[in-house]
Image (cartoon, grey):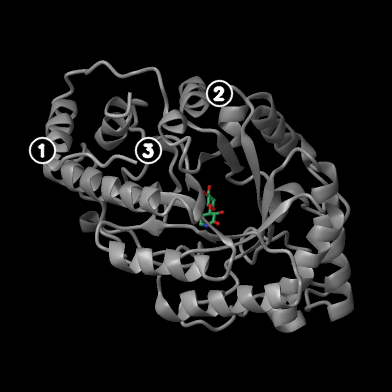
Amino acid sequence: MRSLPLALLLLLMSASCASTSAPVSQKGLKDVLADDFLVGCAVNSSMIDGRRPKADSITRRHFNSIVAENCMKSAEINPAPGVYNWAPADSFVAYGNRHGMAVIGHTLIWHSQLAPWFAVDAEGHDVSPDTLRARMKAHITAMLTRYKGKVKGWDVVNEPILDDGTYRDSPFYRILGEEFIPLAFSYAHEADPDAELYINDYSMTKPAKRDAYVRLVKAMKARGLRIDGIGMQAHISMEEPTLAEFEQAIDSFASTGANVMITEWDMSALPVPTMSANIADSVAPAPDLNPYTEGLPDSVAMAWNRRMADFMDLFRRHSDQITRVTVWGTDDSMSWRNFFPVRGRTDYPLLFDRDFNAKPFVDSLISTNF
Ligand code: XIL
């Protein structure tokens, strides 16, 4: 692992900001980071369908893992009881398999983008614990059976714990209590004993939340349940969290014996009015929340690149604990951060810009390693 001298990094960044197209090696991030961890990105169906060829070539050149941005969420794939919309997920999995990528399934049990029928009866009331258990088992079994041997690992449960360390009042928790998590993991393990199983959440550096996950994962392991990884989404801002907070969380999660994964990395370059990544927590649009519609000022771009490079250095220093770093999308134009937490903004959170050029810190990483 080599870290870049600051002077050289700044030189490369200013060259790139002035858009003098420096020659870039044909090697990709996955080559640079081959000894560290898998490097992945979230992809959506428009790319898989061939409607975004430049995103497709970025993905094949730079990433050796992909995760489904939306097509495997229950509302998309299981819109009615027993009805499965397999086609988009089949294409996503086939794309990853065809290109030798580690394919990650996202996500089985989540309160957001939850199929509307999943936890309610015909009158719209919560179903009984028995019914919910049966539905969870049927859904998880259908998903893991179909993609057995084709999907490396699954985000089994997403975002079950709040920042204060208490359980989220989701239908799953309301109806089944804490046990819904161990149940989901055991259904998944039963359906595909070879699949890796992960738990995933945002704001994982918040101490109460972090410690709650450490307790939960240790307790699950003590019961003999399979849990391979703790996913830190890492939807970060220019200010939060600090590198020290992030590092402490990596060490805490690794102390459980599970692998640590950075699962949805992106960094907004805009003012971030809430660090929540819960998709219901949106904020009203306002002009001062969307300051860079005409492009990112150089000073902000430099600060963004510097901080992203620092995070990448941190991840590489912890490559014995981190097994995958996945970014939440290919290029800025398709990032969910253009509409979350504030709708209709122009954000710059990903590794490739709207013209599909690598951001300076990515270029630097590649050109200084080859
Ligand atoms: C986001 C997708 O990127 C959007 O396209 C969708 O409209 C909402 O969900 N945490 C997660 C992801 O685990 O599934 C979310 O993805 C972002 C927050």
Crowding around mark 2 (Cα neighbors within 10 Å: few <14, some 14 to 19, many 20+) is: few
Q: Is residue 83 left or right of residue 364?
A: right
> Can you say which quadrant of the picture contains the N terminus?
top left
Q: Which mark is residue 51?
A: 2
Residue underneath mark 1: 7
Crowding around mark 3 (Cα neighbors within 10 Å: few <14, some 14 to 19, many 20+) is: many
Crowding around mark 1 (Cα neighbors within 10 Å: few <14, some 14 to 19, many 20+) is: few
Q: Quadrant of residue 248?
A: bottom left
| Residue 298 is at least partly visible in this image | yes
> Can you say which quadrant of the picture contains the C terminus?
top left
Measuring from the top left, give residue 205's x and y in whole percent.
Answer: 40, 69
The amino acid sitting under disc 1 is Ala
Mark nearer the N terminus (2 vs 1): 1
Mark nearer the N terminus (3 vs 2): 2
The amino acid sitting under disc 2 is Arg
3 and 2 marks in contact (CB < 8 Å):
no
Helix, strand or loop for disc 1: helix
**Vertical relation: 23 (above or below) 1:** above
User: Can you tell me whether the CB of the residue at mark 1 lies under 8 Å from the nearest atom of ligand 1?
Assistant: no
Helix, strand or loop for disc 3: helix
Residue underneath mark 3: 332
Residue at image point 80% right, 49% down: 144
Camera-side residue: 170 or 163? 163
Camera-side residue: 120 or 39? 39
Q: Quadrant of residue 118?
A: bottom right
**Vertical relation: 24 (above or below) 239:** above
| Residue 128 is at least partly visible in this image | no
| Cα separation between marks 3 and 1 | 27 Å
